[in-house]
Amino acid sequence: MNARKRARSGGEALIRAGVLTRYRCGPDNRTGHHMHWLSKAAGALRRSILGPLVALGLFAAAAPAYAALNLSIGNPGLQHFDSDGVVQLNFGLTGPDGQPVGNLTAENVKVFEDGVLAKVVDFRGVGQGRPVDIVFVMDVTESMQPYIDAVKQSMVAFAHDLAANNRDYRLGLVTFEDYTVSKYKDCNCAYRDTLTSNVNQFVQWVGSLHASGGGDIPEDQLDALAYASTLPFRPNAQAILILITDAPCHVRGDGPDREGDLAYREHKNPNADVTNLVPDDVSRMLRKQGITLYAVAPPPFIEPAYAEIVKATHGRLYNIVTEEGRFSTLVREIGHTIATEYSLSYKSPRPIEDGTTRNVELKVDYNGQTAEATTSYQLRGVGGASLNPSGPSAGAGTGGIRLAQLSFSWWNAAVPLAAILALLLLSRMRFGLSTEDLRAIIEAHAQQSPAAAPPPAGMRAPTRPRPQAPAPPQPAKAAYPPPIASTHGAGTATLTTLNPVAPVASEYTVLKDEVSLGRGQDNDIVIPHPSVSRAHARLLRRDGMFEIRDLNSTNGTFVDDLPVHGAATVSNGSRVRLGDVEFVLKY
């Protein structure tokens, strides 16, 4: 029997023994949605034979840690890894008194990725943190009304602490019982599928909640967390979910909720499992999107699922049984913890998307005392670029043998070569690109990589197809198509490259009133340079003038060496720089 089933069996045994009691409600004395079973459990367990054991465990958990420093680290952020190989980390540091240490500098920290020291390229101390999006995932079944009221009362102080520490915050709300209430349009929820930076609006959202309904004891927390992970988090923001529930969760295989109310039966198949998820599924979802879970929920001996997800996402678990009497204070403390986190960005020693998992170790040295914490992340891309041959494992008291990392120097030549060979095959089969388009791509790649790797042994290099009949001369096609001409009849403008590096063109023609610029192939003007973001900026014609807007690019947009924050006017002859690529705009 696994840990979760043992915990649930123990809870059911306590119910049968009378330690946990259900609420009775309604004129027919039928079983209501739920029970306020955890708070009753705390008192009953103290009076039972298990009381001393539980009290001893709680005392040990609550005893102050005398370690000099306590370091916690969140999920890595990979928003800019594809363009510059940078990884973001958020971490908190507390002293022996449990209070945040607020005066760290970049010199106090070191980051290691797979054992290799990484270069920290950006460090933000307390009061300089990056934006944060926080979504409260709240159980709204009958016993939760006191917690809903406490959240409402605490949110102004919660948001004030974030603002006082210069955190650009947004707040969201997801509600659930035996189904995710706010997922469906008929909930008529003002907070559905949105986040707000107005704390008063959020307080109104929470104030509109009324705890009621439900069915059997467990609720549908897993589906609620999965839905919350799909909300519109900002790409550059730290993403946090705060789960508040006093019940265990349904998992795949539990079967249907036979005690579900009418609302449950209208939104769920009453003859199917409440959810198709297990905790590992939710952990993978949140880790993939860099979301951290804070949970105020039953302890692991009652429901181990929450501890599993919190551990996987490098979050925190608070025992709702022992924290019941100070819940309002706890909400403010969670806000203070988030507000006083540090943020740093480091350059990966292997800035390539190869599908591998990277282990990250953070070390802090402060006033002669040290603390360490670890996390990991997995990259998208083609797996197998890193081969880790098995070697003897490190034994106790030995230095061990590290896994050998094979060189990645072949990767940049092998992948383009494989793509070109595939295109060649498609062109011969009369699929995909024409021969002329393929020739242009091969020539562009040759200019970018003069010393490209030779084709594999036994394979002939691609040859120019023999013409079947004389044909009129065709104009050479560029590797990147020019933007479509404007239908407004406006005059043309040009972006002339000041420091052209292949395959960046020496000049781009602007024929539309609004064009997108970036490294991605879906832009109007494609600038194939690693310092340029996929979606870097937009150039707009306004009343005979041009305006450029930065799209939250990694390396910034500049006009005449002045950084663009939002938008800036570009005069005729002004210099425009995207990352490391500089142009002159003439119109």
Image (cartoon, rainbow, N blue to C red):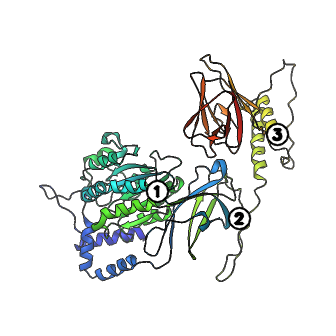
* Distance between the alpha carbons at the discs numbered 2 and 3: 33 Å
Name the foreground residue: 39 vs 575: 575
Q: Dot 2, crowdedness within 10 Å: few (<14), some or many (≥20)?
A: few
Q: Residue furthest left?
A: 27
Residue underneath mark 2: 388
User: Which residue is pictured at 40% across the width and 46% down the height?
Assistant: 197
**Which part of the image, by quadrant, shows the N terminus?**
bottom left
Name the foreground residue: 123 vs 482: 123
Tag 2–tag 3 contact (CB < 8 Å): no
Q: Quadrant of residue 575?
A: top right
SS class, disc 2: loop
Q: Position of residue 167 (x, y in %)?
A: 46, 53
Name the foreground residue: 195 vs 357: 195
Relative vertical location of residue 579 with respect to residue 545 in this rendering, above or below: below
Q: Position of residue 175 (x, y in %)?
A: 34, 50
Q: Quadrant of residue 396?
A: bottom right
Residue 340 visible here: yes
Q: Quadrant of residue 99?
A: bottom left
* Distance between the alpha carbons at the discs numbered 2 and 1: 29 Å
Amino acid type, mark 1: Val
Residue underneath mark 3: 447
User: Which residue is pictured at 26% across the width and 66% down the height?
Assistant: 37
Q: Position of residue 501 (x, y in %)?
A: 78, 40
Name the foreground residue: 153 vs 222: 153
Amino acid type, mark 2: Asn
Relative vertical location of residue 451 with respect to residue 29 in this rendering, above or below: above
Residue underneath mark 1: 282
User: Which residue is pictured at 64% across the width and 42% down the height?
Assistant: 533
The mark nearer the N terminus, 2 or 3, is 2
Amino acid type, mark 3: Gln
